[in-house]
Every structure is written in structure tokens, then in C-alpha cells.
Amino acid sequence: MREDGLAQRVGYLPPAMIGEPTLKAILLFVGAYHLVTGMLALFAPGTFFDEIGRYGAENLHYVGDVGAFTTAAGIGLLVAAYRPSWRVPILWVGAAWYWLHALNHAFDTDAARSQARGIADTVLLALGGFGAAYLARVSERLEAR
């Protein structure tokens, strides 16, 4: 059943595909991943560039900037695990971030270590955006109950 029209008037929302405990665990895992990745880029930008973000010319200042943004995203996700009211906005912003990041990578696939790596990074980032959007919808459904 669709969520608009009659379904909305009678208060029907399809069930969330995952429950609160699973969503919280996912947010904790993804938040910790972003926190660790961000801290690596922030405090060891050379290592991050060499091992993860080798695109174009090395610029350790910009790698550190990416680390700051990614660390903040990780903190937001960790807080959202315990504050359900944060989930929907954090996850929709995260989806936009991942999709825009994927778009940026799509233009630079030839600047990666290999063409295959550039394409893989682009696809994985786009999938991350869909994952964040899915979790945002799950959060919306859980909030509506």
C-alpha cells in the first residue's frame, strides 16, 4: 500500500524493514567507521592519501579538511544512535553527501590508482547514499509509530 492518499488518512505506514535495535547497531557501526576514517585523514593525512584517497595530486591540507568533515559526520551518527530525533536529518544529509561525493568521483575516475578503482569507488559511494536514504526512511517510519 502506498503511504499517500487513503493510506495516510487511515494512519497506515508499511512496517519498517528493520527495528530499533538493529537501526541503532547500524548507526553505531557506521558512525564509528566514519569517526575512525575521519580521524585518520585529520591526524595522518599522508597515510590516508596513500592508502585510501589517492586521487590527483597530494594536498595534505585538503585531506585534513575531509577528515574534519568525516569525523563530524561520525560524531553525528553516533549521537543519532542515542537520539532518535537526530536520525532523519543526519541520514538525509548523509545520503546527499554520499551522492554528491559519488558524482565528484564519477568525474575523476581516471585520477584514481586505476580506472577500475575509480569506478568501484564511485559505485560504492552511490550505494552508500542509497543506504543512508534507506535508513532515513526506516527512521521516519519508526518515528511515526
Image (cartoon, rainbow, N blue to C red):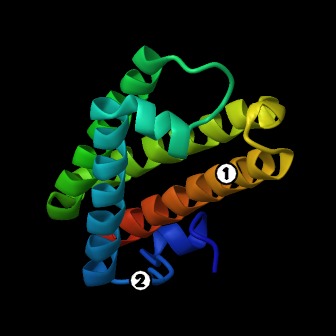
Q: Is residue 145 visible?
A: no
Q: Neighbour class for label 1 at 10 Å: few (<14), some, many (≥20)?
A: many
**In the depicted structure, whether residue 76 falls above or below residue 54:** below
The residue drawn where x is 56% and y is 38% is 53
Residue 144, image x, y percentages: 33, 67
x and y percent of residue 7 in the render?
Answer: 55, 74
Quickly name the residue at label 2: 18
Q: Earlier in the sequence, mark 1 or mark 2?
A: 2
- Distance between the alpha carbons at the discs numbered 1 and 2: 21 Å
Q: Secondary structure at mark 2?
A: loop
| Image side of residue 45 versus residue 85, left or right | right
Q: Amino acid at mark 1?
A: Ala
Q: Nearer the viewer, residue 101 or 23?
A: 101
What residue does disc 1 label? 126
**If the image is split into quadrants, where does the C terminus sit?**
bottom left
Count of all numbered marks drawn on residues in the image: 2
Name which residue type carries label 2: Ile
- Left or right position of 82 against 115: left
Q: Element at badge 1?
A: helix
Q: Nearer the viewer, residue 73 or 83?
A: 73
Q: Is residue 71 visible?
A: yes
Circle 2 Cα neighbour tier, 10 Å, few/some/many (<14 / 14–19 / ≥20): few
Give me the disc on residue 46: none
Residue 26 lies left or right of residue 103; in this view the side is left
Residue 49 higher or lower than 121, as above or below = above
Residue 93 location (% of width, % of height): 44, 40
Image location of residue 124, percent across then percent down:
66, 57
Q: Is residue 124 above or below residue 23?
A: above
| Quarter of the figure with residue 71 | top left
